[in-house]
Image (cartoon, rainbow, N blue to C red):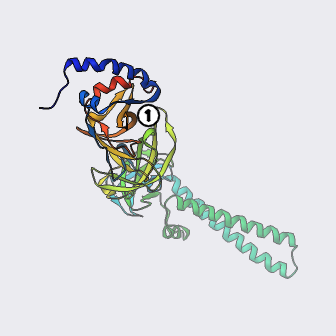
Amino acid sequence: MPHRPNRRARRAWLPCLLLLACTATLAQEITVTAAQQKALGVTIVVPEPQAKREILGLAAEVMVPNSQLHVVSTPLAGLVDTVLVAVNETVKRGQLLARMQSSALAEAQRAYLQATTQRELARANLDRDQKLAAEGLIAESRLLSTKASHVEAAALLAERRHALKLAGMSDKAIAATQSGSTISSTVSIVAPVDGVVIAQMAQAGQRLEAYTPIYKVAQLDPLWLEVQVPLARAAGVREGAPVRVPSVEAAGRIISVGHSVTPSSQTVMLRALISTNASRLRPGQYVEAAVSVADGAVHQWRVPNAALLRLEGKVLVLARTTKGFRAVPVTPIQEGPTTSVVTGDLDGVTGIALGGISSLKAQFIGIGR
């Protein structure tokens, strides 16, 4: 049976413990002989360095990258006639999404035809005045005025054409309008890119103003992951560091590290680009992420939970020295049922106290005050 100190032996050590407690506030180290360790039931374990340095269990939100999110809006005021696609449907670039009826489109086509006529008239006037000027029959000022009128007419036509393009008309439809064969009030809403419809903001029969959003179309691969990491654990996180979402085996890399801290949570925001298995994630989803730390920046160790000493809001381990023990602050980053992964200055530590923690705690009461 293991040796257990009797009550008389414990009382014999008590004055020593009280004396040591008074000196702990100065040195953060106490002297404990091998005999005292045995009497107090102190055992020693060696911290296990972690080969892969990661910050685990970080809260993260899946986001669509800004460059991959497109809002499809109405180019003109009008009435939504037909809605052809719904949320979660995959669409191709140029695919028809919806139709609407707009009197403003007919007015824009009329203005375009008028500008076409004015440009043709200005072109004819310029040709005539150039011939007359060559024969010396008109003043040069008149020719300059005719040229200016032609430039203005051409600019107005280009403006009217651009307005029809913004209204969703194709070059073929504009050419048909220019020939005078047709004028239509139907506005076609098409997909700007290949992607997935993630939101629908309008219904058939709804009257909308110009530039009212109808759909949101997103490209869902790759995706962003916005990770919140506590400020105390952010040391060593660098752009390019690997990131993974263990639950779905998704992975990527950090593309930016926040330069400010969220006041309410004291966290730093990291943005990662997830390029591996991004299809297993959904925008708006909350997940737990693991972020790798730069080599040598933060050392991680696995220690038994029973070796952790909590004192005045701090977490410590008692590292063995040649004379006894010293208190080393650590930060738990992953807590398990029996062991935890911590960061701290444990390089060169040959062992930490495991048993007898409650007996040694009194000797460190003054540490950290």
**Residue toward you, 159 or 133:** 159
Image location of residue 322, percent across then percent down = 37, 38
Up-down relation of residue 54 to residue 114 (above or below): above
Q: Badge 1: few (under 14), some or many (20 or more) residues near its Cα, within 10 Å?
A: few
In the rendering, at what x and y percent does residue 329 appear? 40, 35
In-image side of 336 versus 317 (left or right): left
Question: In the image, residue 336 lies at what x, y percent?
Answer: 26, 39
> The disc labelled 1 sits on which kind of residue?
Ser
Q: Residue at x 43, y 30 (%)?
A: 28
Q: Nearer the viewer, residue 135 or 192?
A: 192
- Residue 285 visible at all: no
The image quadrant where one finds the N terminus is top left
**Residue in the picture at 60% in, 59% down:** 111
The structure residue drawn at horizontal position 27% and vertical position 30%, both measured from the top left corner, is 35
Q: Secondary structure at mark 1?
A: loop
Residue in the foreground of this view, choosing between 194 and 315? 315
Q: Which residue is mark 1?
A: 265
Q: Classify residue 234 as left or right of residue 303.
A: right
Residue 195 in which image quadrant: bottom left
Q: Residue at x 26, y 34 (%)?
A: 306
Res 319 visible: yes
